[in-house]
């Protein structure tokens, strides 16, 4: 079992982290039928881009050189409204976290193209304060380890996101 410890200067806490259970990255989403020819970050030049404000991808996009290449950047507080804007051709592409995009696309009847932005990759784990609920921490960590070992984590990821994000 692998555990992580994080010391944070801003809150002066030290936390225990369970093993990673999910990895996500920022992605670009376009409509399959789009004639905008967006296949990479460089293709954002001159395009109207929608960004989900709750995603960490916003931070990475805003601090990238591609941010200034977009003709217009629109901010959306709702994934549903963001995808509606894409479907209505109000924007040419979406920039968001892969987990959000895949959750919407999995249940969608429309065809979308997901392009890896390569701006970032994030690992997800559960944090527990040291010396508080260590029994719960060990239980959760063991459950994640077991799910990884027996393949359950792959099944869960495929069920919710349509692909393995472990």
Image: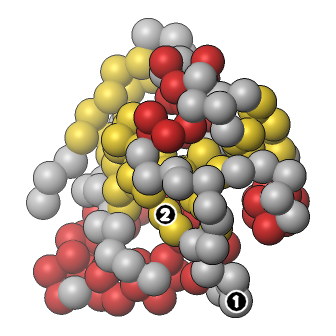
Quadrant containing the C terminus in the rendered view: bottom left
Of the residues under marks 2 and 1, which one precedes in the sequence? 1
In this rendering, is residue 47 above or below 29? Answer: above
Q: Which residue is mark 1?
A: 109
Farthest residue, direction front: 35
Residue 121, numbered circle: none
- In x, y percent, where is residue 124? 40, 52
Q: Residue at image x 14%, y 52%?
A: 2
Q: Secondary structure at mark 2?
A: strand
Q: Residue at image x 38%, y 37%?
A: 120
- In x, y percent, where is residue 1? 12, 60
Nearer to us in this view, 160 or 31: 31
In this rendering, is residue 63 above or below 6? Answer: above
- Real-space Cα separation, disc 2 to disc 1, in angstroms: 15 Å
- In x, y percent, where is residue 64? 49, 21
Side (left or right) of 124 relative to 70 = left
Residue 56 seen in the figure: no
Q: Residue at image x 50%, y 40%?
A: 43
- In x, y percent, where is residue 16? 33, 41
Mark 1 surroundings: few (<14), some (14-19) or many (≥20) residues within 10 A: few
Residue 114, numbered circle: 2
Q: Are marks 2 and 1 in contact (CB under 8 Å)?
A: no
The picture quadrant where one finds residue 158 is bottom left
Q: Secondary structure at mark 1?
A: loop
Q: Residue at image x 80%, y 67%?
A: 87
Side (left or right) of 166 relative to 47 = left
Residue 154 seen in the figure: yes
């Amino acid at each position: 079992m692998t555990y992580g410890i994080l010391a944070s200067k801003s809150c002066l806490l030290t936390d225990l982290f369970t093993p990673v259970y999910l990895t996500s990255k920022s992605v670009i989403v376009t409509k399959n039928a789009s004639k905008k020819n967006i296949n990479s970050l460089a293709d954002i030049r001159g395009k109207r881009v929608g960004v989900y404000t709750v995603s960490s991808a916003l931070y990475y996009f805003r601090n990238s050189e591609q941010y200034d290449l977009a003709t217009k950047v629109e901010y959306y507080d709702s994934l549903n409204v963001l995808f509606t804007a894409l479907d209505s051709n109000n924007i040419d592409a979406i920039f968001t976290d892969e987990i959000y995009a895949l959750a919407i696309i999995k249940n969608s009847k429309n065809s979308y193209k997901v392009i890896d932005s390569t701006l970032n990759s994030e690992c997800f784990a559960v944090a527990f304060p040291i010396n508080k609920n260590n029994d719960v921490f060990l239980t959760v960590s063991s459950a994640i380890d077991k799910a990884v070992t027996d393949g359950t984590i792959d099944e869960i990821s495929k069920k919710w996101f349509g692909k393995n994000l472990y």
